[in-house]
């Protein structure tokens, strides 16, 4: 299974949506840098990611979430990881697909 | 050099309407910080400055930014200091806020919320617009 990473805001590029279209059931998505804005409540992309979470595991890099001040808006069901957790996810998966 | 060309009084009287448009999220790119630095440097000149935050730019003003674990500088408190530099006209796009589930209470500084047509009118009034 693939670990997908998205580092761009979903409002800014189509990387997030394109990534979701290519996520197979059971694969994982890690939101990092400006990609964390895709994991928030009450926002334009909340429904899209909530729906995707039925089939894929979604993680978010906590330092990037906190830096941007949106930690209170994090969607339920998204798992927070730190830098060590990022490394663990990279090792646990066969490969990493970075949607730059 | 003639006196006419460098009439100091006349120069100081030239106040332009200057708008900075901020459209990028903080930290992911350098645009937000660079814009803030330009605004602060520009504040040394007596100009009629307006700051606009739209699209992901509204995230620059989000309360509660904590950059410690990323080892980046949290520059968000600087927006609160803009007042001291006579930069007091801050405008935010209503739609950009609602698309992101944000309200005025989520922002670290008082702002005026504008819809797109009001924003367009404000842009039309300016002499210079710089976008980051």
Image: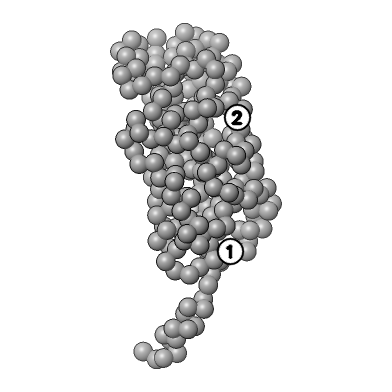
Residue B122 image point, x, y percent? 63, 58
Q: Quadrant of the N terminus of chain B?
A: bottom left
Residue A66 image point, x, y percent? 43, 30
Relative to B6, B107 lies left or right: right
Residue at (39, 9) in percent of width and height: A1
Tell me the subunit letter for badge 2. A
Q: Nearer the viewer, mark 2 or mark 1?
A: 2
Q: Quadrant of residue B101?
A: top right
Q: Which residue is mark 2?
A: A43
Q: Is residue A47 above or below residue B69?
A: above
Residue A95 image point, x, y percent? 34, 15
Q: Which residue is mark 1?
A: B126
Rate crowding at label 2 as few (under 14), some (14 to 19) or many (20 or more) other CA atoms within 10 Å: some
Relative to A34, A47 lies left or right: right
Rate crowding at label 1 as few (under 14), some (14 to 19) or many (20 or more) other CA atoms within 10 Å: some
Residue at (36, 21) in percent of width and height: A82
Residue B95 image point, x, y percent? 64, 41
Tell me the subunit letter for badge 1. B
Question: Is any atom of residue A15 visible in this view?
Answer: no
Q: Is residue A100 above or below residue B97?
A: above
């Amino acid at each position: 299974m693939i670990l997908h990473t998205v580092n761009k805001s979903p409002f800014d590029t189509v990387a997030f949506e394109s990534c979701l279209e290519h996520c197979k059931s059971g694969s994982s998505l890690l939101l990092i840098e400006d990609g964390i804005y895709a994991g928030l409540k009450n926002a334009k992309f909340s429904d899209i990611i909530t729906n995707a979470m039925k089939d894929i595991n979604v993680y978010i890099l906590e330092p990037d979430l906190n830096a941007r001040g949106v930690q209170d808006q994090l969607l339920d069901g998204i798992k927070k990881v730190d830098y060590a957790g990022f490394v663990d996810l990279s090792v646990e998966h066969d490969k990493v697909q970075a949607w730059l | 050099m003639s006196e006419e060309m460098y009439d100091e009084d006349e120069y100081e009287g030239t106040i332009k309407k200057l708008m900075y448009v901020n459209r990028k999220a903080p930290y992911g790119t350098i645009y937000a910080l660079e814009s803030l630095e330009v605004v602060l440097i520009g504040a040394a000149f007596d100009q009629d400055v307006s700051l606009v935050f739209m699209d992901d730019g509204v995230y620059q003003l989000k309360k509660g930014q904590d950059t410690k674990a990323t080892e980046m500088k949290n520059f968000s408190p600087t927006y609160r200091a803009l007042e001291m530099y006579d930069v007091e006209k801050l405008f935010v796009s209503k739609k950009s806020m609602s698309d992101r589930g944000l309200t005025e209470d989520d922002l670290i500084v008082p702002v005026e919320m504008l819809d797109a047509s009001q924003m367009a009118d404000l842009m039309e009034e300016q002499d210079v617009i710089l976008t980051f």
